Every structure is written in C-alpha cells, then in structure tokens.
Image (tube, helix red, strand yellow):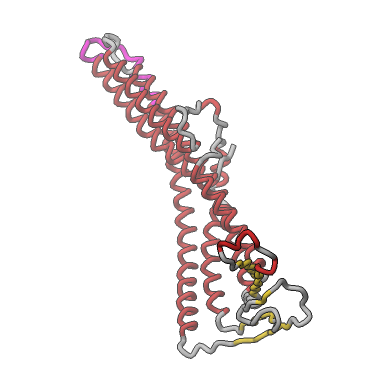
Amino acid sequence: MMEGNLDLKRSEQSLRTTERAVVNVFTQIIPGVNLDWMLTKELSELSRVTAQDVEYNTNILFNMPSLTQIPFDYYSAKSAVYTAQKTLEMKKRELVSRLYRQVISYQNARISYRNRLNSLPYDDDGVQKKIAEQELEKSLDDISEGFATLMGNMEARWLVKPETMPRLDWGKYKSAARHLDLLVVTMVAMELEASRLQVLNAKMKFFPSVDINFYSPTLFSSTGGTYQGFFAGGGDMQVNMSLREELDTRLTSWFQYKTAKENHDLMQKKVLMDLQQRRIKVAALMESRRRFEVWKRVILKEIEFKKSQMAFSGKEYLDQRKDIKTMYENLDSETAKNAEVEAALIMEYGWLK
C-alpha cells in the first residue's frame, strides 16, 4: 500500500548501498587493469590504417588493502547492513503508525461532523449545517493529502475507510508494555556498537599492517608501470609482502583512541538513560490512554444525560445545546490527542492485533 513512499524507498536504497559495501571489501583485492588503445596517424592516411599503426598498453595495479584491515572492514560493513535492515523495519513501523494516525483522523472527522449536527438547535435554518459541511470537506482535503504523501502518489484523492483497518488488541499492548520492544532496543544497541567500532578502529592503528603487492619486471613496475602489448604470461611474477609498524611519536593515534574511548563511555551512559526514559515514556502513554478511555465513557454518558433532559424554556434549551456542543468539542479535541498517543504506542511496539 505504501510501496511508493519516498522515505521507505530511501531506506531500501540505503540498505542496498550497505550490502554493496560488504562486497566491495573483497573486490578491493581484485587488481585494477587499464587497457589503452592508441592510434597516431595523419588525417590523410586514416583510410589506410593497419594493425601496425595501433599500440596497446596495459597498466595493472595490484594494491591490496592491508590484511589486518580486511576483517575489521568486513565486520564494519556487515554491521552497517544489519543496522540498515533494522532501520528499514523501524521506518515501516513508523509509516504504519502514521497511516493509523491518518485513518483515525478521518474517522474522528466524520464523528465530529455527526456530533456537530447532533448539537445543532432544532430550529436551525441550515446555515450551521452548511458551515459544518464546509469544515468537514476542508478537513478531508488535508487528510487526503496526508494519505497521498504516505502512499507516494499524488494522482488521486485518497481516503482509507476506518472499517477496512484491522482492529488493534490493546490488551496485547498492555502486556508488551512491561518490557521494551526488541527492535527499539536493537536500534539503541547499534548506536553503542557504532561507538565501539570507532574505539576498535583507533586501536587498529597501533597494530602493524601487513601489505602485499604483486610485481613483474617485464610487465609493470611496483607503482603501476606500462607494458606494450597484452599480458601473455606470469612466469616472472613476484610477490612482495611487508610488515609495517608506524610509531606514534606525535601521539596522534593515542589522542584519537582516548577521544573515541571517552565518547564510547559517554555513549554507554546515554544508552542506559535513553532506555530508562523509554520505559517511563511507554508507561506514561499507556496511562494516558487508560485515562482517556475512562473519561470518554463518562463524557458520553453525560452527553446522553443532557440530551434526555427536558428543557422548560427557550433559553434553557439553547443553553443545553450549547453545553452539548462544548462537550462534543472537548471530546473531539481529546480524541485527537489520544490518536497521537496510540500512534506513539504503535511506533514503539508495532501493529499488535
């Protein structure tokens, strides 16, 4: 339904990019080969070009990454893929939450319209009803635009009927709220892992690097020379392996490591604080929704009671309709706020039905 959403497509594209980065770790080992075709000839002689007039040059570069760096690069790339996968899951959950909010907004707009009609005086001349219809139409235009944005399709006026939406089981949310959601915890944990990788990357600079270069005197130099003709054999191929240790005499690597370590320590504390605040937030959302349901039942009973009361004068009748109108407006306002609460819970735990 929301396959055309731009945010979703960006997340999917980000995942594909990280998957290519994993492959790129190993493709860096493959040598680079440049083939040059050159022709030098006078313009008047271009019609008589022969094979002897063409020169072929081969340039091959065997610059392999350090063997000590390959495992780290591979793990970092795989970690980025996992993070992108979880980010895509979270993006889908976010879109579902936004879709739910839009559907509820549509439902509330229709209920609000009916409530407004019910609160009109019986002697209304049709003006107030016309105003209510215009306001409903304006609300539906805004809601339709929100649906179009979610679907990534502005070619039509979209409205999703609330009746087609699967019912949520709020009892399951009550049970799930006892613990933090695994996806949410994973996203926080991957922030911590990214910080840990920065520390590990700083440590890697203290280890020697193992470099391998291939060299052929007749074909190319160690810096990537040029040989006339095509590569015909590798009998004179030589392998140079070097173990290089760079002394940190200026303490540059040491300072980078200390900074990364301090940032990681701060990140650990931040993660703990974020998880604790998340639990407090979830508890507050569940309590807010519980209170709204209690208040909603009370206000609906009060409205029904007001409607059942007999008015003994015109003023008393108008005051009664005014009170009913005010209570309906309060109900609409609180219902809209509760929709935000429910959407936030869906964002935390997904669609539980």
Whether residue 20 sits left or right of residue 304 in the image: it is right
Between 132 and 275, the residue placed more toward the observer is 132
Where is residue 141? Give x, y as percent: 38, 28
At 49% across and 79% down in the image, what residue appears?
Answer: 257
Inspect the magenta stretch and tell me whether residue 301 lies in it.
yes
User: What is the quadrant of residue 107 in the picture?
Assistant: top left
Where is residue 76? Give x, y as percent: 59, 66
Whether residue 258 sits left or right of residue 334 in the image: it is right
Residue 238 versus residue 200 in the image, above or below:
below
Q: Quadrant of the C terminus?
A: top right
Any part of residue 75 in sight:
no
Where is residue 260? Give x, y as percent: 48, 74
At 23% across and 15% down in the image, what residue appears?
Answer: 316
Where is residue 94? Give x, y as percent: 50, 45
Q: Quadrant of the N terminus?
A: top right
Between 31 and 22, the residue placed more toward the observer is 31
At 65% across and 86% down in the image, what residue appears?
Answer: 242
Between 153 and 317, the residue placed more toward the observer is 153
Residue 271 versus residue 253 in the image, above or below:
above
Any part of residue 233 in sight:
yes
Inspect the magenta stretch and tell me whether residue 190 lies in it.
no
Residue 293 versus residue 25 in the image, above or below:
above
Q: Please identify the dominant SS of the magenta region.
A: helix
Between 345 and 303, the residue placed more toward the observer is 345
Q: Which stretch did the figure color magenta?
A: 300-317
Whether residue 312 sits left or right of residue 52 in the image: it is left
User: What is the quadrant of residue 170 in the picture?
Assistant: top right
